[in-house]
Image (tube, grey):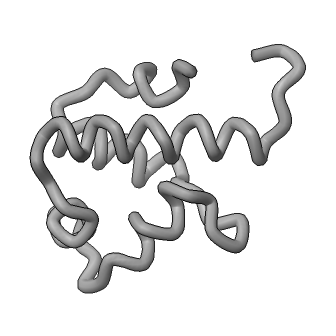
Amino acid sequence: MQNITPKRLYQIVGKAVAKYRKEKGLSQLDLSMQMGYKSVSVVSGAEICYKNKHFNLEQLLKISQILEVEFCEFFKE
């Protein structure tokens, strides 16, 4: 990961979140609501880096707890 751009890192993380979310059988709305949001926009935008949206560390921590996935797993390609 030494020569990776921030945008590429956000894409890797978003793709990983989507993968683990789907494995747990949760919709984007389900995950959003469990994170404390009332709409799907945070999760949907960050999973695909729409308009440079991405998850922050606090959101990733919540997601790892909800999905019961080790935090570091989100950073693996």
Looking at the image, which residue sits at the far top? 2
Q: Nearer the viewer, residue 14 or 69?
A: 14
Count of labels shown? 0
> Residue 42: image x %, image y %?
44, 71
33 w.r.t. 12: above or below: below
- Asked whether, in this view, residue 23 is left or right of residue 17, the answer is left
Which quadrant is home to the C terminus?
A: top right
The quarter of the picture where residue 43 lies is bottom left
Q: Position of residue 35 (x, y in %)?
A: 24, 63
Quick one: quadrant of the N terminus?
Answer: top right
- Left or right: residue 52 versus residue 42 is right
Residue under the image location 53 percent in, 39 percent down: 13
Q: Is residue 55 above or below residue 40?
A: above
Can you name the residue that lies furthest to the bottom here? 38
Q: Observer-nearest residue: 39 or 58?
A: 39
As drawn, which residue projects farthest toward the right?
3
**At 74% across and 39% down in the image, what residue appears?**
8
Q: Percent x, y for residue 12?
A: 59, 36
Q: Residue at x 52, y 61 (%)?
A: 46
Quadrant in which residue 66 is drawn: top left
- Looking at the image, is 76 positioned above or below residue 46? above
Instruction: Return the x and y of residue 10 as percentages of the image width and height.
Output: 64, 45
Relative placement, left or right, of 4 versus 76 is right
Picture quadrant where residue 53 is located:
bottom right
The residue at 63%/69% (across/down) is 50
